[in-house]
Image: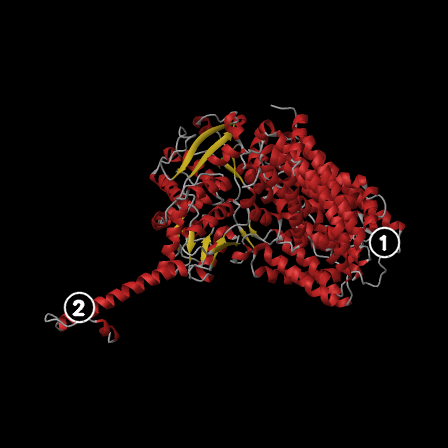
Amino acid sequence: MEASLFDAAIKGFFNILQLKVFFAMLIGVSIGTFTAVAPQGLGMPLVYAILLPVVIKWEPVTGIALLIGASSVSAICAAYLPILFGIPGGSGSQATVLDGYPMGKKGEGRRALGASFMAGGMGCLIGTLTLIIAIPAAKPLIYLMGSPELFVIMLWGLSMVAVLAGRRPIKGLIAAALGLMIATVGQQAQSGIMRYVFDQPYLLDGMAISIIALALFGIPSALDLALTKLGVEQQAVPLKGSLFDGIKDTLREWWLVVRCSFVGVWVGIVPGLGSQVVDWLAYGHAAQSAKVGRENFGKGDVRGVIAPESANDAKDGGDLVTTLLLGFPQGVTTALFIVALLAWGYLPGPEMIKKNADMIYSIVWIQGIAGITGTLVGFLLAAQLAKLAEVRYTFMVPIMFIFILLGAFSVNRDPLDLVVVVGFGILGYFMRRSGYPRPAMILGLVLGDLMEKYLYRSVASYGFSWLARPAVIVLLALAALSLFFTLRGQMRARKEASASTFSGAVARSASES
Amino acid sequence: VKRLERFKLPDRETDGPAQQGYVVITIISAVILVLIFVAEAAIGQSFYEGKTITMIAGTEPGGTLDMRTKALTHFLKKHIPGEPTIITEHMPGAGGRKAANYMYRVARPDGLTIGTPVSGFLMLAVLKEPGVDYDIHKFIYLGAPDGVAHYIFHSRKEASLSNLEKLRAASGVRIGAQNVGHTIYVVGRLFAYALGLKDARFVTGYSGVELDAALVRGEIDARPNLAETLIRRTPEFVDKGLMDLHGILEAPAGKKHPRFSYLPEIASFARSDKARSVIEMFRASRTTGGPYILPPGTPKERADVLKEAVRKTFNDPAYQTEYKKLVGDDLAPVTADDVEKAIKALKPDAEMIELYKKIAGPGALPIQ
């Protein structure tokens, strides 16, 4: 190494001490905030794609400040929609709707937002710290997990259906099976076989999870407001809780934040997992590991907001570990970030650690500072945006429908997506009325594709000998233990409170309607 | 004509009816010529002035194709008379079929919609795959920026397949790829077919990055990759000798890669005319690159304006620099005529289509 990492860290910090760098970061923060509040189709990849031809003409550190500023804030501020309107945010922030929206309905929207920003900010810092720690030794982390290990972890994730289904295990299994079945639509990657395509080009690539999640949760929420004829926070409950209550909640749950942030970092580091699972894995972990009040998950438990938000924001740090230290992009956004680095003459990967360690540290500093700025911006805006929840339903319901339809259309810009969003919206409404847990279906949908892929790859590469791999055996044992303790906890909770039996995260909230 | 008589020169002895006729014909011809020039100018300049051209990209924002489009638009605008606004609309899905179907069936042939589906949309039509509602011979092609590609077939050092003899002798070599039908998958299958590998096993379902990690972990033994990607993303694979490089597929044929010119070309492995033909079929499809297209029926004058603008853009040094910056590869332009020629040549017989489908499909590889 040409310079010590400490020297590089100092130099990296001095690199960013320029007015224009901070100005660029603030512009990025503004763009990120707008992206977070706008319908979900306006995601970071599109923003990066628009910004890239402009910023590559700038000085590297200024361009990096704009790009990193936008992406880190976008993740932190992604909780507005799920908490205030019950509309899932972009991928990585969908599970927040499970407890965020019930909190909003109980008059605790501000508290939920406070918790979400605080958890997001802390998650972002933990992700950044991990990036700093990982700089000397990142490679083994990435090569540690093979397809067999990842399959077992996905299997472990699927066991969360037990939590999400609660009192209705059969309905939970049916919903999860429906999700798994929908995940099989499209051309199967491994065999090329068309499944449930019916000669429709629209179905060749399968169904978009983001559109289905938007429909399953967003439309029933909008219908809910229309039918009760009340705004989100006009649901006959007094307004209570403040942003500071949310901050206090998060600080009290610091250990949960740390654990879920590591879930996020890990998802960010491992190639192929993607952001769609991060919030669900963290939420499941929080619900499974809760020692007290587990029955409150799905009914407006602040831990159900803290877990997915901290994981989602910590993931960016994990993403950067692989992007900067190995040159492996983890998604479209990081692929575009690599394009920008290449255009500036940097070669992400081991070469960059050797030759441009100061620039890596500049990125780390910017990531950390942007995370703090994003949290502060979130707090500043939250007080104003939270007022939206008090708006009359006659005004709010049409806006929600516009957001849902616009969000669905902007994913692929295909008119058929509007048909799908309406169809799944109706399905979501009836699932909620009949007590079928919608999160179990989303979980099946999210994990189904990954499980199939990892299982296929494991068998194709190792035959059935993958079952004898030590890491697989350990992970299987952990998954079995986790499921055992979850089920035991549920049974105990039932015994302890026969009147208000533990109904599980979402099945219970579903029955509220 | 009567009005023009006011401008007639005084009659001379030689001015007979025949001469008067010539004058009228000359004037009419001149008027027609002026009208043609005015029309051309109107089509070339006034038509695009203040107009908006929509680029239909067949992938999501952020992919290589998107970067190619981004690099092009700013410079293309400069080279179209009237400097129209150019916007990009993304229409990903079905391996480019969605965008191509849109260009064929929905887009108005008015010269204001340019398509850039992923290059695979051509082969999907040649192979008569489902979901193809377009005729590739009816599109109007404007050229392509990426007519050169080099694929390298390599295996991990620990697999002990250091030379071709060992590779051919090994049984059950695990070759990784993205999806069945993906270009990298087809190239891997072509190498296995041409080399006559014994019971090669194809492990799919990876992203490009995951494939590299799987190679290092030993989950797969070999994979093909684009030479430029190999150098850029995993330089240590080559520099530190972590991989054994076995062969190269050059498109177009004979276009050597400056760094890997020593590697044997895939065609040299083939032991039958059939094998050579199917390799050439793939090569031809790759040589067209990812062309820019216009809907069938676009007026010739407007198509010509756009063809010329694309040609000028490809020759613009500033564009070439921008392309290198955004895409990472050097520009390898293919002219509109060359794209059309290559596509006309893409008319394999039924037997060749069958063989290609077997190679690009999921089943066992045919034997040479």
- Label of residue B178 in the image: none
x%, y% of residue B137?
Answer: 37, 55
Residues under labels 1 and 2: Cα distance? 105 Å
Q: Chain of mark 2?
A: B
Q: Quadrant of the image for the N terminus of chain A?
A: top right
Q: Residue A235 or A385: which is nearer the viewer?
A: A385
Q: Residue A85 or A373: which is nearer the viewer?
A: A373
The residue labelled by disc 2 is: B22
Q: Residues within 10 Å of mark 1 (few under 14, many from 20)?
A: some
Identify the image's colour scheme: rainbow, by chain, secondary structure or one colour: secondary structure
Work out whether residue B214 can be spotted. Answer: yes
- Label of residue A501 in the image: 1
Q: Amino acid at mark 2?
A: Tyr
Q: Residue B119 or B88: which is nearer the viewer?
A: B88
Q: Residue at x 71, y 65 (%)?
A: A397
Q: Quadrant of residue A145?
A: top right
